[in-house]
Image (cartoon, helix red, strand yellow):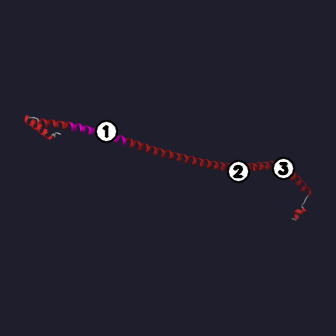
Amino acid sequence: MEKLVNDFSFGLFFWQIIILVVLVLLLKKFAWKPILDALNAREQGIQDALDSAENARKEMQNLQADNEKLLQEARMERDAMIKEAREIKEKMISEAKEDAQKEGEKMIQQAKATIQNEKNSALADIKNQVATLSVQIAEKVVREELSSKAKQEKLVEDMLGDVTLN
């Protein structure tokens, strides 16, 4: 260190200071300003990116809230549609049951009327057949009874005997 103090030269020191000052001025004019501008631009770019990311995050939250709201509305609409469909189904089933019951009762009444008509027709037919058979039997009996003159006279006498005179 003594050697440095002994070899010290003011002229060299002076020129070194001037070169250093010139170098600092040149660096300030040509290097530091562009470097600082680049750093500021980079800092601004990073800040813009952070702001964009924050805005995107907020927008995502808004979209998520909107999606949740839309999903809730869709669920409510779906539930309403399902409820309406169930009501329509139950109404259709009850109407079908009522119609089927009315149709069944109508068919039963028609069947009863048809059965009654058939019964009346059958009874009338049986009465006609009985009357015809009765007439045929009576005719045969009367022919048999009246086949001879003696039988005819006996029949007349029996009938007269049965008749009481007043």
The earlier-in-sequence mark between 2 and 3 is 3
Magenta region, residue range: 108-131
Q: Do callouts 2 and 1 mark residues in contact (Cβ within 8 Å)?
A: no
Which residue is denoted by mark 2 in the rendering?
54
- Residue at 55% x, 48% y: name it: 79
Which residue is denoted by mark 3 in the rendering?
28
Q: Do callouts 2 and 3 mark residues in contact (Cβ within 8 Å)?
A: no
Q: Is residue 59 left or right of residue 37?
A: left
Magenta stretch: residue 123 in it?
yes
Magenta stretch: residue 14 in it?
no
Q: Is residue 106 left or right of residue 134?
A: right
Q: CA distance from mark 2 to mark 1?
A: 92 Å
Q: What secondary structure do most residues of the magenta stretch adopt?
A: helix
Q: Residue flagged by tag 3: what amino acid is it? A: Lys
Q: Is residue 91 left or right of residue 63?
A: left
Q: CA distance from mark 3 to mark 1?
A: 127 Å
State which mark lies toward you, 2 or 1.
1
- Residue at 41% x, 43% y: name it: 102
For residue 163, the mark is: none
Which residue is denoted by mark 1 in the rendering?
117
Query: Which of these two is toward me, 108 or 142?
Result: 142
